[in-house]
Image (cartoon, helix red, strand yellow):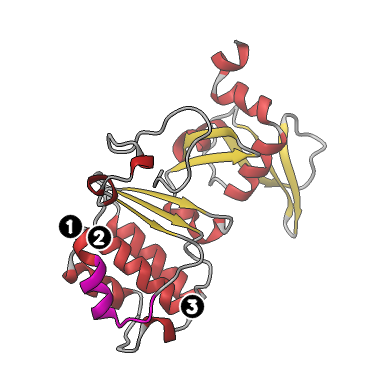
Amino acid sequence: MIGLLFPLKGTIDVNGFAPRKRWPSFLETIYFIPEEVYVPSLTIEQYINLFAPFYPKFSREQFAKHMDELDVHSNDKLNTLSFGQQKKFVIAFGLACNTSVLLLDEPTNGLDIPSKKRFRKLIASVMNEERMIFISTHQIRDLDNLIDQVVIVDDGHLLMNEPICSIAEKLLFKTIDSTADESDIFYSEDSLNGVSIVTENKIGTESKVNLEHLFNAVTENPERIKQIFQPEKSIA
């Protein structure tokens, strides 16, 4: 999506651009924050002066606000900060660039518990109809309240691409004493309170989607899940 890797087949279109061409007019609309961030031996002000001009919608006011919300305050060179502080700085800068597409790879890795809370609050506050935020993560519990669309890819295959409301409508997540009286269980896991299961929601009961259990249910039963969400395709 950002043009660093090329597809072996097919095409990719982002904001009307072919990413592989990496036109400046495309790059100013997209920002990528990798799991392992790199910061040069520059102060925050030097970094802004060097990189902000590449993003016409960059806002110093928003950047300062994001830095305060993430509790990053330093005049030292960025490479002398802890990894967590470096990551929060890059997140604040990326958000302040106001690109229409923002990609975050494992954004909570390296953050302590208070910082994860601040991150969730910040991301929720900047979401709007003009910005699309992609989050790739294995730390689902850190981010489940932020997710409105779930995409599950396993071994290179797209298994699910559904809004969270659709998942809650068609699947039921609950804890029971025993699975003896249950049918059509897609996934079960023993817990201290009983057995947590994922099953088809045949009675219209609303439940909170457990993303970890959802992933296991989908990857272990891809065809059965497809019959629920895409019956016409599974028949074909």
Judge by depth and name the residue closer to the eye, 180 or 135: 135
Q: Which residue is mark 1?
A: 57
Q: Earlier in the sequence, mark 1 or mark 2?
A: 1
Q: Which residue is mark 2?
A: 97
Residue 22 within the segment the image draws in magenta:
no
Q: CA distance from mark 1 to mark 2?
A: 6 Å
Say what secondary structure mark 1 lies in.
loop
Q: Dot 2 lies on which element?
A: loop
Q: Is 46 one of the magenta-colored residues? A: yes
Q: Which residue is drawn at the image coordinates 54% and 43% (left, top)?
A: 207
- Tag 3 residue: 83
Residue toward you, 151 or 13: 13
- At x 29%, y 60%, the residue is 125
Q: Is residue 51 left or right of residue 189?
A: left
Report crowding for label 3: few under 14, some 14 to 19, many 20 or more residues within 10 A (C-alpha). some
Residue interval drawn in magenta: 40-51
For the residues labelled 2 and 3, the Cα–Cα distance comes to: 21 Å
Q: Are marks 1 and 2 in contact (CB under 8 Å)?
A: yes
Q: Can you give x and y, in whole percent of width and height, for residue 118 in the image?
A: 39, 70
Say whether marks 2 and 3 touch (CB < 8 Å): no
